[in-house]
């Protein structure tokens, strides 16, 4: 007796019982039974991309006369519903399935065919009215539509989700770099104290790291614009109309607003996943950047009583079930773990790439799962890290103090007294705990003013710190400074040594490098903020431009 909970579906292998309300048919049900491996499914973005391919193929097939307009119209309507997010629960095949993704392609064909028959007000069980293979899959093979869906879904996700998230993260880090531009701290190499660096300089490095990774992703994503559609089973295009692949690509381009093209060589694009491997490598680079930044921020925020405690990060939740008041860097830890998962995904993709043979790489579902998961993990982590951590970071003056006790300050004496004498001073500082200035006064006989200038931590964070003191007359003529090419007035916003600042005179607004006293000839004359007015002791090439 037939159960009211199931219906009987047929395919080339015979009859199979399918859930009564399911849009999929016999072949999908066989895949469900054959692959009870996990509860993992291909991402909604992949399913939408696959439905888009079916939509565009139906339009092309109708236009070239291979498919009636009535059937094509019904397929297009059904595909639009799937693209909009309907019926995702009908895509039930496990990720760990046939390596070509044929089961997922069949799942799509059966869902669209049954839904199209319902749209046509025909018997939904009558496969002769609209057939999943003969009509929905017309001119296609799993071997070209699955890699095409892989490229499209990764391309759309990276453009719409990941790159905007990275742009916002880079901007947030750059904003902190500007806000922290005057804050000097101990640099560190090998986890040991090194010469001073500005907190803003560290954050500028983080911003640049994210920016470079984003540019690499954007550039490598260009390879995803070339699609396998049109190659059918082995790249020859058998059973497809002449021009079918390029026509489908034109339809996809129009629908998405992103220019895509048919692959120049189907035998490469269907037998390999080289383009995906290259793209995944850029995601790996970004994940490694996350780990570097996260580790630095966790170290800098460590404490609060016995760590570095150079910065404070937002407290978002209690950190311990046993220690009252403990707060942990949980947002950073979350981003760290997401990045580790991305590294794992890239490794899976690399091993999958070497598993291809002859005309097909038979690992496509697991590649698609890992690639799209990696994109989303990186994008969501970027937004989460920015909103719940980066935006709220503040410097901790207590943790940032003590730069003057750093024996690495003796490095600034190298150009004046030589490495060996500077090393001897650093050794005494380490042994006695005295300041570098006090020891240098005693050991070198140099003037205190000159030593203070050389050992100023702020001036050590830029080139030119060891230039001998030299007085230069101040230029006040018409309140104008000029580098011979363009004049600048007081208050003009300019870019100087990579920082945006403003021209100012005398004791007006202090700048990151001190006061820009004048621009005379080919040089910019700069006075550190602690130096007596009128005493210009730093001269830089006049590489200044409007900001």
Image: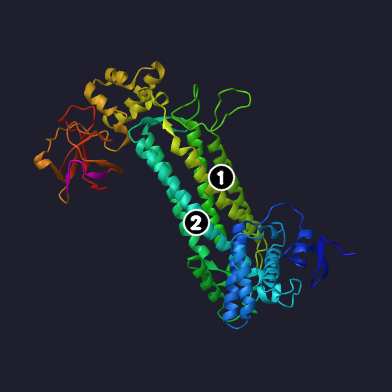
Q: Secondary structure at mark 2?
A: helix
- Decide: few, some or many residues near mark 2? Use Cα within 10 Å; few <14, some 14-19, many ≥20: few
Assign the magenta stretch its main secondary structure: strand
- Decide: few, some or many residues near mark 1? Use Cα within 10 Å; few <14, some 14-19, many ≥20: many
> Image height check: is 279 above or below 8?
above
Q: Residue at left 58%, top 48%? A: 342
Q: Residue at left 26%, top 35%? A: 511
**What is the tally of numbered marks visible in this picture?**
2
Q: Is residue 177 visible?
A: yes
On-image quarter of the N terminus: bottom right
From which residue to which does the magenta span run? 487-495
Q: Residue at left 74%, top 64%? A: 28
Labels 2, 1: front one: 2
State which tag comes first along the sequence, 2 or 1.
Answer: 2
The image shows residue 490 at horizontal and vertical percentages of 18, 41
The image shows residue 215 at horizontal and vertical percentages of 44, 54
Pointer 1 residue: 339
> Image height check: is 517 above or below 74?
above
> Image height check: is 68 above or below 495?
below
Q: Which mark is residue 71?
A: none
Q: Residue 494 vs residue 199: left or right?
A: left
The image shows residue 167 at horizontal and vertical percentages of 43, 49
The image shows residue 301 at horizontal and vertical percentages of 48, 30
Q: Residue at left 68%, top 55%? A: 41
CA separation in Å, label 2 and label 1: 20 Å
Pointer 2 residue: 160
């Amino acid at each position: 007796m037939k159960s009211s909970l199931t219906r009987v579906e047929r395919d080339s292998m015979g009859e199979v019982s399918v859930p009564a309300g399911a849009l999929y048919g016999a072949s999908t049900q066989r895949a469900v039974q054959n692959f009870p491996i996990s509860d993992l499914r291909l991402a909604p973005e992949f399913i939408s991309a696959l439905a888009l391919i079916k939509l565009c193929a139906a339009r092309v097939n109708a236009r070239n006369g291979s498919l009636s307009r009535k059937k094509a119209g019904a397929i297009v309507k059904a595909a639009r519903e799937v693209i909009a997010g309907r019926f995702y629960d009908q895509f039930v095949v496990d990720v760990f399935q046939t390596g070509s993704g044929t089961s997922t392609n069949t799942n799509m064909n059966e869902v669209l065919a049954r839904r199209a028959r319902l749209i046509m007000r025909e018997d939904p069980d009558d496969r002769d009215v609209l057939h999943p293979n003969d009509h929905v899959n017309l001119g296609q093979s799993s071997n070209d539509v699955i890699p095409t869906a892989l490229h499209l879904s990764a391309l759309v996700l990276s453009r719409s989700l990941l790159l905007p998230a990275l742009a916002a993260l880079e901007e947030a880090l750059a904003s902190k770099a500007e806000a922290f531009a005057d804050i000097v701290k101990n640099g560190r190499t090998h986890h040991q104290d090194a010469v001073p660096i500005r907190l803003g300089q560290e954050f500028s490095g983080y911003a640049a790291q994210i920016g470079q990774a984003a540019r690499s992703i954007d550039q490598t994503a260009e390879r995803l614009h070339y699609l396998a559609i049109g190659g059918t089973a082995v790249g020859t295009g058998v059973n497809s109309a002449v021009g079918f692949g390029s026509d489908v690509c034109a339809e996809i381009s129009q629908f998405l607003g992103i220019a895509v093209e048919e692959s120049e060589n189907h035998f490469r694009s269907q037998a390999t996943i080289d383009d995906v491997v290259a793209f995944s490598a850029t995601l790996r680079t970004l994940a490694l950047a996350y780990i570097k930044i996260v580790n630095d921020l966790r170290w800098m925020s460590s404490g609060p009583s016995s760590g570095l405690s150079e910065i404070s990060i937002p407290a978002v939740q209690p950190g311990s079930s046993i220690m009252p008041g403990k707060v942990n860097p949980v947002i950073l830890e979350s981003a760290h773990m997401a990045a580790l998962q991305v590294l794992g995904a890239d490794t899976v993709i690399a091993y999958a790439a070497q598993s291809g043979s002859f005309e097909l790489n038979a690992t496509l579902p697991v590649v698609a799962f890992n690639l799209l998961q990696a994109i989303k993990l990186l994008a969501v982590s970027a937004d989460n890290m920015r909103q719940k951590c980066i935006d709220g970071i503040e410097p901790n003056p207590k943790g940032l103090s003590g730069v003057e006790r750093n024996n690495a300050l003796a490095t600034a004496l190298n150009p004046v007294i030589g490495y060996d004498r500077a090393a001897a001073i650093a050794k005494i500082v380490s042994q006695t705990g005295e300041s570098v200035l006090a020891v240098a006064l005693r050991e070198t006989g140099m003037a205190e003013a000159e030593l203070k200038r050389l050992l100023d931590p702020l001036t050590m964070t830029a080139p030119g710190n060891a230039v001998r003191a030299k007085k230069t007359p101040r230029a006040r003529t018409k309140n104008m400074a000029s580098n011979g090419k363009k004049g600048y007035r007081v208050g003009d916003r300019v870019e100087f040594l990579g920082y945006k600042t403003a021209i100012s005179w005398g004791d007006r607004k202090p700048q990151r490098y001190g006061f820009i006293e004048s621009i005379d000839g080919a040089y910019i004359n700069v006075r550190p903020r602690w130096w007596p007015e009128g005493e210009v002791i730093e001269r830089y090439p006049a590489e200044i431009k409007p900001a």
